Amino acid sequence: MYEILTLILPLFGLIVIGFVTARLTKRPVEQMGWLNTFIIYIALPALFFKLLSKTPVEELASWSFILTNIGVTFAVFLIALFLGYVTSKRHLGNATMQGLAAAYGNIGYMGPALAILAFGEKAAVPVALIFCFENVLHFANAPALMALSGERKGGIVTLIIGVIRSIVFHPFIIATVIGVAFAILGAAPPAPIESLIAYLAQAAAPCALFAMGVTLALRPLNRVPLELGYLVPIKLIVHPALMYLALSYVGSFDPIWVFTAVLMAALPTATNVFVIAQQYGVWVERVSATILLTTILSVFSVSALLYSIKTGALPPDMFP
């Protein structure tokens, strides 16, 4: 139990510190801008590059792992999309946001920090693969379905260009591509630059978790929408459970890869879903409530998951 507490306290302790700091200092949300910029454009890309550039190339081409992960996440998206379509009286825009809220976890902002702290640097490879391919899935699904719902911004050409730009020019994906290129070539940056990258990478986890706590403090929950009655269990319980079952069925993956994928699936709704909701003016307040509630509850659900993993109660393969 002491080992689990030692693991969990730094993870969620940083979130709590950020939350309390924001409540005490009462700084406006706009002052978070540069910290978020540092995390998204500098620290996390440096972390991805540092770890991927030293990864054996054969580990980066695990297509059975990638396809299983994407298949499960897309299935979760479709389940929530269907439920949202029925409960929102066939409003495809609202249903799309519900699908994203249930399937799009905080895999870029919170995921790398938690996975690497929990399982070590070896978790960085599956984290990067999950991030790249799941973001391609979500970045393509959201504008396409919004276009079908009549919430399209601009023409079809603008839509396609926007999807491509959001995928190709995301800093995490750029860092991943460069890191993979260095791994394939067996190259390394000059020593001074490598030291700088390592220094920046060390800041990624604490800054991301602290910023998450600040974000929670600055986004109060006014009311709990009825839809959260099924969205929260889907995101925090169904998604990781299906991921675990699917990876066990396909089988024989590295235990760290399995546990990393399950942890990534267990994460709360991504803040990117709020950005997408604002972009289209659809389901904005309810997305904010979903993010806040899933993040608060994930403190307990993710802690329970990590406890199960570390104590051996959850084996790496259910069908050995």
Image (tube, rainbow, N blue to C red):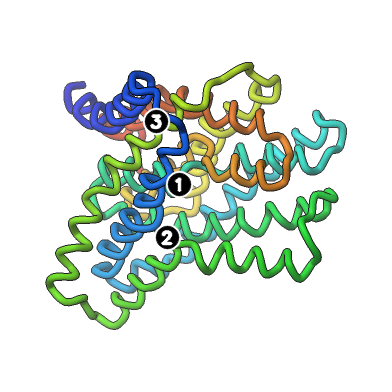
Q: Which residue is drawn at 32% across and 24% down?
A: 21
Residue receiving disc 1: 107
Contact between marks 2 and 3 (CB within 8 A): the answer is no
Q: Where is residue 312 in the image (x, y as percent from the top left)?
A: 28, 33
Against 171, residue 274 (above or below) is above
Against 28, residue 274 (above or below) is below
Q: Which residue is drawn at 40% across and 53% down?
A: 40
Crowding near pointer 3: few (<14 within 10 Å), some, many (20+)?
many
Q: In which quarter of the image is the N terminus?
A: top left
- Mark before the other along the chain sequence, 3 or 1: 1
Give the image quarter of residue 274. Answer: top right
Crowding near pointer 1: few (<14 within 10 Å), some, many (20+)?
many
Residue receiving disc 2: 172
- Mark before the other along the chain sequence, 2 or 3: 2
207 and 120: which is toward the camera: 207
Instruction: Using residue 290 as the reference point, say whether residue 14 is left or right of it.
Output: left
| Residue reaching furthest to the bottom | 185
Q: How far apart are the two marked residues, 3 and 1, measured between alpha carbons?
A: 18 Å
87 and 175: which is toward the camera: 175
Instruction: Using residue 101 as the reference point, say whether residue 40 is left or right of it.
Output: left
Residue receiving disc 3: 214
Against 11, residue 174 (above or below) is below
Q: Which residue is drawn at 86% across and 37% down?
A: 90
